[in-house]
Amino acid sequence: MSRADVCVVACAEAFRGDGEILAAGIGGAVTVLAARLARLTFEPDLLTHDGVCLLTGDVPALGETPQVVEGWLPFREHLWLVLNGRRHVMLGASQIDRHGNTNISCVGDWARPKAQLLGVRGAPGNTRCDPTSYWIPKHSARVFVPEVNMVSGLGTDRGAYELRRVVTNLAVLDLGGPGGTMRLVSVHPGVSVADVVAATGFELAGAGDDVPRTREPTEEELRVLDRLDPGRLREREVAG
């Protein structure tokens, strides 16, 4: 078992209880694996797709072509799912604040930024209309900031629909703190609460001595992960 295995399972747990909605992992191997792992284990009714325009009946390994196609998912249909709350997306973020506002647009003064990033993309609609979770592969005070330089994804103080979970290479967090603020839910094996606090640029609710440890993958989950990711691409994505 590796830290990456723990992170994938923690991300998969964000989809628990979702039922028959589209589970969309964006931006890397870990989030895609999380959706597929959830479907193959504890959440069999989840809808998954090939990353382009097909709903898949089977659950292929990373990089493989699905053998069973359940439906066609052109962009207009994808947008229908988003607008009607039928998708749970797991996004990344360059910055995130204590209310879960995220920035994927620019770093520095938005009128004259130091760095131009992706833009807001679909973050406003996703966070306003659907359950949204985040995967942050490198937990640091440069990412977890007191105030984002520009709001791309909405936080709890700006009308987010439901911010479910924030998983990082160090811990699992949610927005269950006072006033919808970031709360420490668990720390990964080998990580201390002090490690998480030191890597966060604002005060975390729940950062006491009794924070539980993130659950480890079961033997079945590890077998499924090895089938879905035989090249262990997940390891390259997780900061050690």
Image: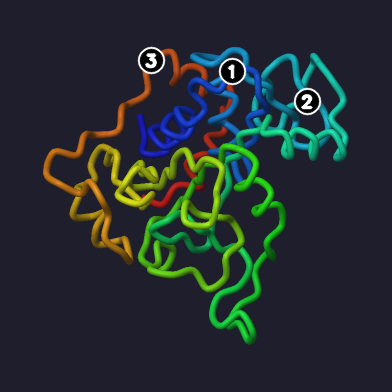
Residue at position x 85%, y 40% in the image: 75
Residue at position x 51%, y 39% in the image: 234
Residue 145, relative to residue 176: is it above or below? below
Q: Where does residue 187 sit, x and y in percent of width and height?
A: 27, 41
Kindly report which numbered mark, 3 or 1, lies closer to the viewer in this rendering: 1
The N terminus lies in quadrant: top left
Q: Which residue is mark 1?
A: 19
| Crowdedness near tag 3: few (<14), some (14–19) or many (≥20) residues, C-alpha within 10 Å | few
As measured in the structure, the alpha-carbon distance from the residue carrying label 3 to the one carrying label 2 is 26 Å
Mark 2 lies on a secondary structure that is: loop
Q: Which residue is mark 2?
A: 65
Q: Is mark 3 in CB contact (under 8 Å) with mark 1?
A: no
Q: Which residue is mark 3?
A: 219
Mark 1 lies on a secondary structure that is: loop
Kindly report which numbered mark, 1 or 2, lies closer to the viewer in this rendering: 1
State left or right for residue 230 relative to residue 187. Answer: right
The amino acid at mark 2 is Thr
The amino acid at mark 3 is Glu
State left or right for residue 69 relative to residue 107. Answer: right
Closer to the N terminus: mark 3 or mark 1?
A: 1
